């Protein structure tokens, strides 16, 4: 896998190792913070993890990423949407294992990244294209989004709390419309944070409808240590094959996304990060970030396309700006009022945003296949895509005693196996 530099390269405002003046540094870093803020806190909020811990793990993971990649790749890492379903399952199921299981699952994701990084270092990257082509990754990404659709609908209607509520539905729809308007028509800084705009508008409308519980906000303090879940301190890891296989296979999906982001960064910055500092370093850094998150109770993290979009628009590629955003994220995690407000966000608001975001995840998988010119008129491609979609969305699973291999993980594994087994050309 290689990436050529572009001939229409535009000179950056700040290159990768250039440091801005302190006042510009603060503003530019805060812009990156708010760009990732909505998505990063959305994942823990909808999965009932601690949003402040997610912010801190996001910041720590990004700093670790910058260090491991030798400060050569301007990438921000935030909470990954790919793991919403398995995290929810592990926390909700009676035998799921709770936070201890999520910790082990998140840790296993980092281990998979580390193993693949080691293989890439010694073997190269060509084998990844054979194992994870668009015909496998695209449908799996669609499964991730579509399998979450019932959860979005339930939150938007209030049925996840035991009954239908027209006020909840109305707030959800207003939130959805506000987010869409922000994505379509807002310009400049506000155009970069449509999810956060949707959050704010939905929250204000929820206040008018009496859906906000102010108890936590009244009890909050300015400085507050989040509820970290630390192994063997206030949480016992739950190590089972079911837990590992619930999340570890999805690392290959986010890995493909990671490499796509690297290709995009190559084009934007006119560099080849696959060679310097090397794909093995960026994969190892991404995996290390998830391991850090697992040790304090955060969700798995991955590179964020939203922040890459900010780089492309502003032409500011400075890793100092990215590092500044990470420091601010860590600081925000210790502000009690922020955690209290985030925790008090009604499910109606989350449902409204989910109706869009979970669909965006699904369509990004479709977009990957279209841009890669996957020909679904070929029986081989049609078979792989069809089986992956039905297995994943249908929830087909393997269950042997206490061992379970859930539908989403099965979809990823079956897609990889079918791609390797079915020949490229047949006699038919």
Image (spheres, helix red, strand yellow):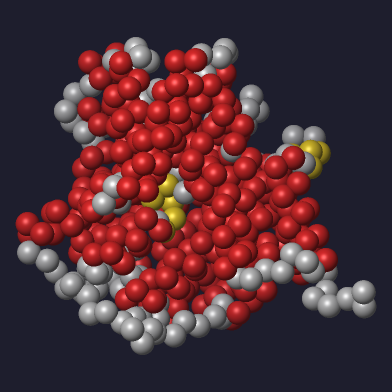
Residue 300 x, y percent position in the rendering = 47, 48
> Which residue is rendered at x = 7% and y = 59% of the image?
22
As drawn, which residue projects farthest toward the front?
185
The image shows residue 145, relative to residue 373, as above or below, that is above
Q: Is residue 293 visible?
A: no
The image shows residue 64, relative to residue 220, as above or below, that is below
> Which residue is rendered at x = 54% and y = 44% of the image?
359
As drawn, which residue projects farthest toward the right?
427
Residue 1 x, y percent position in the rendering = 54, 80
Q: Which image quarter holds the C terminus?
A: bottom right
Side of 348 relative to 63 (left or right): right
Viewer-side residue, 427 vs 184:
184
> Which residue is rendered at x = 88% and y = 76% of the image?
426
Residue 260 x, y percent position in the rendering = 49, 67
The image shows residue 166, relative to residue 337, as above or below, that is above
Residue 277 x, y percent position in the rendering = 38, 78
Q: Total number of numbered labels?
A: 0
Side of 12 relative to 123 (left or right): left
The image shows residue 201, relative to residue 304, as above or below, that is above
Q: Is residue 134 visible?
A: yes
Place residue 318 in its image quadrant.
Answer: bottom left
> Which residue is rendered at x = 23% and y = 53% of the image?
188
Place residue 207 in its image quadrant.
Answer: top left
């Amino acid at each position: 896998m290689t990436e050529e530099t572009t001939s229409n390269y535009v000179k950056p405002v700040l290159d990768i190792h250039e440091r801005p003046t302190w006042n510009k540094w603060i503003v530019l870093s805060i812009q990156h913070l708010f760009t990732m803020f909505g998505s990063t806190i959305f994942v823990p909020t909808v999965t009932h993890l601690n949003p402040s811990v997610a912010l801190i793990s996001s910041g720590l993971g990004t700093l670790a990423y910058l260090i491991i990649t030798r400060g050569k790749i301007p990438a921000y890492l935030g909470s990954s949407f790919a793991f919403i379903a398995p995290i929810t399952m592990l926390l909700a199921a009676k035998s799921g294992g709770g936070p201890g299981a999520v910790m082990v699952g998140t840790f296993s994701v980092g281990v998979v990244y580390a193993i693949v990084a080691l293989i890439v270092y010694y073997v190269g990257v060509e084998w990844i294209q054979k194992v994870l082509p668009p015909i496998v990754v695209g449908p799996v990404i669609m499964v991730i989004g579509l399998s979450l659709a019932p959860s979005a609908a339930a939150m938007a209607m209030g049925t996840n709390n035991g009954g239908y509520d027209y006020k909840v539905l109305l707030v959800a729809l207003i939130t959805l419309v506000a987010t869409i308007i922000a994505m379509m028509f807002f310009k400049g800084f506000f155009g970069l944070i449509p999810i956060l705009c949707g959050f704010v508008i939905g929250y204000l409308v929820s206040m008018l409808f009496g859906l906000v519980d102010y108890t936590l906000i009244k009890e909050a303090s300015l400085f507050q240590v989040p509820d970290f879940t630390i192994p063997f301190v206030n949480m016992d890891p739950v190590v089972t094959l079911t837990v590992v296989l619930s999340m570890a296979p999805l690392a290959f999906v986010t890995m493909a996304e990671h490499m796509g982001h690297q290709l995009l960064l190559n084009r934007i910055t006119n560099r080849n990060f696959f060679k310097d500092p090397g794909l093995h370093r960026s994969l190892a850094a991404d995996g290390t970030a998830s391991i850090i998150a697992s040790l304090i109770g955060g969700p798995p993290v991955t590179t964020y396309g939203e922040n890459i979009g900010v780089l492309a628009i502003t032409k500011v590629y400075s890793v100092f700006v990215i590092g500044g955003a990470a420091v601010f994220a860590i600081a925000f995690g210790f502000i009690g009022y922020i955690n209290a407000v985030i925790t008090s966000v009604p499910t109606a608001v989350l449902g409204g945003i989910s109706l869009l975001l979970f669909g965006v995840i699904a369509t990004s998988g479709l977009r990957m296949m279209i841009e890669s010119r996957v020909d679904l008129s070929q029986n081989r491609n049609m078979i792989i895509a069809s089986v992956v979609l039905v297995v994943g969305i249908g929830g087909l699973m393997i269950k042997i005693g206490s061992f379970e291999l859930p539908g989403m993980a099965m979809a990823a594994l079956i897609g990889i196996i079918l791609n390797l087994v079915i020949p490229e050309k047949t006699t038919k």
